[in-house]
Image (cartoon, helix red, strand yellow):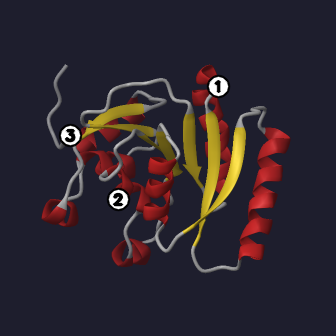
Amino acid sequence: MTDEGLATDRIAEKAKEETVDLVIMGSRGAHGLQEWLLGSNAAEVIEKCGCPVLVIPDGFRFKEPRKVIFATNYADNDFQSVFLLTNYIRPFDAEIVVAHVEQDASHTFETSKMDLFRKQVQSVIPYDNIRFELLKGDSVEKALLDYEEKNNVDMIVTSMRHRGFFDRLTSRSTSKHMVQHSAIPMLVFH
């Protein structure tokens, strides 16, 4: 079957029409001026698609995931995303590291928020191989990519946030930007 139109639009439309559970796509990323002006096809599909998107970077060779990091800011949809992630990861019995990057708030405050989230996850989600960590850093993206490099992480997982018009004008999506720079697969939930 062939379709006409922008690939990113057609992928998102087809995923919705067919009630697709997961879109898997490759990415070469975007750098420099191309990243600033256009972004990447994978980043656009993530933004437009209503289902989870797994992005495999160019040149990546499959290996069974043993450790996955899930970046949280304790949003309502993060709990649901962790639940869905355990369903994807369960066959591999991979460790899930639920991580939050402390930027400006006090450590005591961040610890209490993480403890509440941990208790909620552990009380409802039947998966024993989950660990919770607070990371320090000025940039969420840099802290996650540094952790990934130093800890043999096999996949980065995030939840896409619905951002308002003003927010889209003044800031960029961490998920979309990380897709363009990660050397390992990235799974993004909506």
Q: Where is residue 150 in the image (x, y as percent from the top left)?
A: 49, 50
At label 1, which amino acid type do we have? Asp
Which sits in the foreground, 1 or 30?
30
Residue at the disc numbered 2 = 177
Mark sitting earlier along the chain (1/3): 3
Camera-nearest label, 2 or 3: 2
Residue at the disc numbered 1 = 93
Helix, strand or loop at label 3? It is: helix
Q: In which quarter of the image is the N terminus?
A: top left
Q: Position of residue 159 (x, y in %)?
A: 53, 51
Q: How crowded is mark 1: few (under 14 residues within 10 Å), some or many (20 or more)?
A: some
Q: Which corner quadrant of the image does residue 27 belong to?
A: top left
At label 2, which amino acid type do we have? His
Marks 1 and 2 sit apart, C-alpha to C-alpha, by 28 Å
Helix, strand or loop at label 1? It is: loop
Q: How crowded is mark 2: few (under 14 residues within 10 Å), some or many (20 or more)?
A: some
Q: Which corner quadrant of the image does residue 109 belong to?
A: bottom right
What label sits on residue 7 in the rendered view?
3
